[in-house]
Image (cartoon, grey):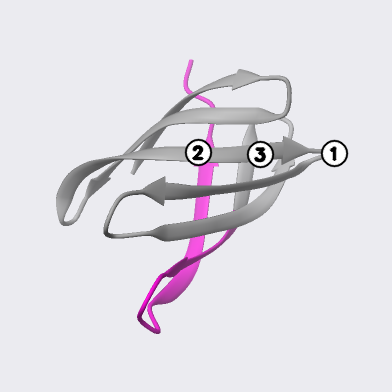
């Protein structure tokens, strides 16, 4: 996945692109004291929660309306 966002204070807005299945969704979220939470906007809501450490973050996700859960990890590009 590729996550791109803009941070304004503690508020996050942007998009997440999934490779399987291929789709791009808008995301909104919050970053407070090393904790990050964000969710996709639209009919296929996926919620993400995790922690930030340096240039990386990791946590868990859950798809609304189903039991699909898992873990995720991301690192800052560049």
Residue 52, above or below 73: above
> Does residue 50 appear left or right of residue 47 in this picture?
right
Helix, strand or loop at disc 1? loop
Where residue 41 appears, as percent x and y from the top left, is 37, 46
Residue 64, above or below 31: below
Where residue 71 appears, as percent x and y from the top left, is 51, 65
Where residue 59 appears, as percent x and y from the top left, is 61, 58
Please, which residue is most extreme toward the bottom here? 67
Q: CA distance from mark 1 to mark 2?
A: 17 Å
Q: CA distance from mark 3 to mark 2?
A: 7 Å
Nearer mark to the viewer, of 1 and 3: 3
Q: CA distance from mark 1 to mark 3?
A: 10 Å
Q: Residue at x 53, y 56 (%)?
A: 48
Q: Residue at x 40, y 84 (%)?
A: 67
Total numbered circles: 3
Main secondary structure type of the part rendered in magenta: strand
> Which residue corresponds to mark 3?
30
Q: Residue at x 58, y 40 (%)?
A: 29
In the picture, the disc for residue 33 is 1
Q: Which residues are magenta?
A: 59-78
> Which residue corresponds to mark 2?
28
- In front here: 45 or 62? 45
> Which quadrant of the view contains residue 7?
top right
> Does residue 34 appear left or right of residue 62 in this picture?
right
Residue 57, above or below 63: above
Mark 3 vs 2: CB contact within 8 A: no
Asked whether residue 75 is drawn in magenta, I would say yes
Residue 76, above or below 27: above
Helix, strand or loop at disc 2? strand
Nearer mark to the viewer, of 1 and 2: 2
């Amino acid at each position: 996945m590729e996550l791109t966002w803009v941070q304004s204070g503690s508020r996050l807005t942007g998009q997440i692109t999934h490779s399987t299945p291929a789709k791009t969704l808008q995301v909104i979220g919050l970053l407070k004291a090393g904790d990050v939470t964000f969710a996709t906007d639209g009919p296929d809501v996926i919620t993400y929660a995790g922690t930030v450490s340096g240039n990386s973050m990791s946590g868990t996700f859950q798809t609304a309306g189903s039991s699909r859960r898992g873990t995720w990890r991301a690192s800052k590009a560049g």
